Image (tube, grey):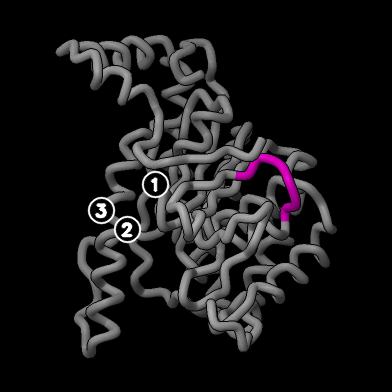
Amino acid sequence: MRWNPFNTSIGVALGGGAAKGIAHIGVLKAFEKEGVKISYLSGTSIGSLVAAYYAFGKSIDEILEVGEQLSFKRISSFSFRKDGLFTTDSIREMIIRDLGDVNIEDAHIPLAICTTDIITGEQVAFEKGNLASAICASVAVPGLFAPVEIDGRKLVDGGIVENVPVSLLDDMGAGIIVAVDLNGVKTYPEPTGMLDVASNAINICMDLRTRDQLKQADVVLSLDLSDYSLTDNSDRAEQLLFEAYQPMRAKIRQVLWFKRTSYLHYLIRLVKNIVPLKIPELFKRFGKPSFPSIKIK
């Protein structure tokens, strides 16, 4: 659909970032303030939770109220299972309490949720099926949370394959893709022990892959939220919201420019993919992810 110059529908991809995900509320608030309609939403991990609440009609204030209560202690349930220290049962209960035991395809805004099959390594993207189950899988950090089983697959955090799920919006039919990356850091914390070294190594690998995937987006908002916690920002929720609100308002001018000059961008995109003409590379660039991907539609 992005190769249709007349398609100016907007899709927004909300990336992972644990408790820093409150910033996504600021992104959605900016779109509302500017009066710009979001036609599609996709989310990974905490991004899937925020996207779901918005797609199912919750207001910015209502989502912020949830954000002010979010912390690792409140959303994790201790488990004696061998495949994870915690379960996502508390998250499931919260979603069903606030949104109901609903299906993804019933959302007011078309929604896609990114997860990873921990056995096959495939991306599993949900556009239909039980909402709470898909979100629980998307936020299940492997080793910390037990995998969530859906249709015989053991699913975990979608950030392993695509932390900002741009490719899902392309498949859904978005004409203009806006990507929100909560991990736009230039450096990483100085490690003080073995676990810190391992954590930095994992984050570096994920961020390098994300930077490459973000090239498929038309507009990218990359935020450095290194001053905020990964586990609990409930006491600074509103401050975190505004970390994204003002930068996104500025980026929306770029989004509107894309809408006004869609035909020109179509021609530029076409030229970039054809010159120099390399047939195998041409097909590779036509918006398809470079990793195995399963879509649940």
Asked if marks 3 and 2 touch (Cβ < 8 Å), the reply is yes
Magenta stretch holds residue 129:
yes
Distance (Cα) linking label 3 and label 1:
16 Å
- Mark 1 Cα-neighbour bin, 10 Å: few <14, some 14–19, many ≥20: some
Q: Going 69% across and 70% down the picture, which residue do you hit?
A: 91
Q: If you read the primary sequence from the N terminus, does the residue marked by circle 2 or circle 1 appear first?
A: 2
Residue kind at label 2, given as amino acid type = Met
Identity of the residue drawn at 75% across and 64% down: 95
Reading the image, the residue beneath label 1 is: 221
Mark 3: few, some, or many residues within 10 Å (few <14, many ≥20)?
few
Tell me the distance, in whole angstroms, between the alpha carbons under discs 3 and 2.
Answer: 6 Å
Residue name at image x 54 percent, y 49 percent: 114
Q: Which residues are magenta?
A: 126-131
Sequence-wise, which precedes: disc 3 or disc 1?
3
Q: Which residue is mark 3?
A: 208
Between the C-alphas of marks 2 and 1, the distance is 17 Å
Q: Which mark is residue 175?
A: none
- Residue 71 lies in quadrant: bottom right
- In the rendered image, which residue does mark 2 sit on? 206
